Image (cartoon, grey):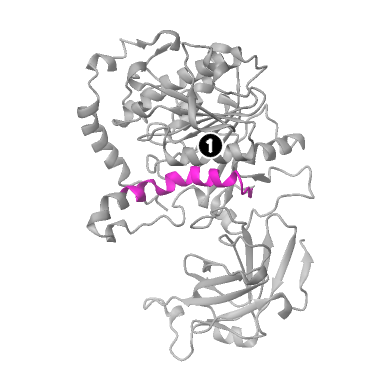
Amino acid sequence: MVNETGLLFPTLLFFSNSFGGFVHNDTPEVRADPDNVVCYGIFDCFPITPPWTSARRPIALYPEEPSKIDVRFAVFNGGNRTYPKFLNIDDPDTAHTSGINPDGTIYFVTHGFLESGKTKWIQRMLNLLLDKDPRSTVIVIDWGKGSNPPYNQACANIRLVGAITAHIIHMIHEELGMKNLDKLHMIGHSLGSHLSGYTGYTLQANFGLRLGRITGLDPAELAFTETDELVRLDPSDAKFVDVIHSDATPFVPKIGLGLYEPIGHVDFYPNGGFNQPGCRRDFWKQPNTRFVSEMFQFFSCSHSRAYLYFIESITNPVSTVACSSYDKYNAGECFDCNIDSPTAGPSCIEFGLSSIAGYNRLVARHIINPQQYQPIQLFFKTGPSEPYLTENFKITVRISNTPESIAHGAEIGKIFLYIHGPGGVKSEKIFFNEQSMLFEPGHNYSSVIAGYSSGHPKSMTIGWEYDTNLLNPLTWRILTAPRVFIEHLHVQSLTEHVQVKMCPTYNQPVTTNELSQVSEAKCKHKLRPMV
């Protein structure tokens, strides 16, 4: 499947680079000469020879002047969330007077292309982080003046911003007497992910310090895919690197705003890593007065879901499971946390803020050897709207092999359901299979679903959408109404170690005209342990 945002976005970047360069980039051409390396004092020099130029990165520019980028470091804490104090690399006293708690977690949060430190998602994230841990400190890296078009100039600027950030962190480390950087956590979106990687690299190369953690929120793909580890975020940049891929494309390089390739210790792929549910794909149908805003929302929707999911994980953690592919996960082939198998391979890790706890748990069980890098790819599904992070359930549908079902034969279509929970809570419509498929008598079919977040399912309402095709005789229904005979279904939770068996009224088909109710009460065996 091709990422639906990716085909046009490179074109927009082309115009952004072309016109943006004409308007914004007044730097002499000599700066792009690889023989005239640009240096900025203590922040070092920035060559544009390989690996900074490559087949995937044909154009490389030098970073703009530090005074032009004018990066700022705004410090927030539990007692000051409105009027931040600012760190100054030329004034070490600001490390003491800005309100940093060296004994608590220190978060550095940074934005991406065409954004600034005042963007709403950063404000929301810092407040939730401080709500969760009032002893922590959140430092926002605002490099908004350097994030403007052209895109390749912004890519160059993050090299300098990353180096400046490393010097700021070193200043904090020295002035506040910190033993190490284990409690320092950098969180970056898009280009901000790679910026964080540059910070981690510079801290190790220049100061012998290693960041505790970097979280990459859909790291930018354009000019970073299939490049040298020096150019992009990679696991060596911190003791723990976790990455969320939300707008990537698995099979077509240079398409999509985010990387697909795993570049962390753990890499999360919500909904397979692209085409996030709830992102509108019909922006061209909107009134002309909203066309431009709808278009840009369309292009950025899946890309921005990475930080929305991470923000939600601060208060609503969910478990995810390791798998070799999203297709296998979606088919229910990787739906076991191996709770009863202490020596089993990588299994479940909490998504988002708490992922480091799950990773360390696997290290403690000797399932993961942190000295031998091996990427762990984890998959899960989300809902189309907040709350996005809902528990995933594996549904296995058994098509009856009764004489009536066999006589009727196979059907092609979609099964959908509504989940009923405690207190009369009912989910939105959830498709068991998003694409039409063949259901045959006597066969089992499994799928993973999301979109329900109200406790253990008590019952379900099941419906059938028939799909006919004039060219396929198997779909013709002339004398009988479209229907499927469901014998039972199993509902399995990823985190609760039980299966629930639900049944419809015996031998009562599910038709296109009438919904059917399934429940435990209609089965002979209501609840049994997983096997």
Residue 387, horizontal then vertical, whole percent? 54, 55
Residue 468 visible in image: yes
Residue 375, horizontal then vertical, whole percent? 60, 36
Q: Residues within 10 Å of mark 1 (few under 14, many from 20)?
A: many
Q: Amino acid at mark 1?
A: Leu
Residue 40, horizontal then vertical, whole percent? 38, 11
Furthest residue toward bottom: 479
Quarter of the image where the C terminus is located? bottom right
Residue at 56% x, 49% y is: 325
Please state if 456 lies on the left or on the right of 468 as rendered: right
Does residue 317 belong to the magenta stretch?
A: yes
Residue at 59% x, 36% y is: 130
Residue at 38% x, 35% y is: 115
Residue identified by numbered label 1? 126
Residue 516, placed above or below residue 153: below
Q: Main secondary structure of the magenta part?
A: helix
Residue 340, placed above or below residue 527: above
Please state if 405 lies on the left or on the right of 155 as rendered: right
Residue at 55% x, 25% y is: 237
| Label tally | 1
Residue 48, horizontal then vertical, whole percent? 36, 18
Residue 248 visible in image: no
Answer with the quarter of the image where residue 287 lies: bottom left
The answer to which of 256 and 314 lies nearer the viewer is: 314
The answer to which of 98 and 489 lies nearer the viewer is: 98
Residue 320, placed above or below residue 201: below
Q: Secondary structure at mark 1?
A: helix
Furthest residue toward top: 41
Please state if 33 lies on the left or on the right of 431 as rendered: left
Answer with the quarter of the image where residue 22 lies: top left
Task: Report the span colored magenta.
Answer: 296-320
Does residue 246 belong to the magenta stretch?
A: no
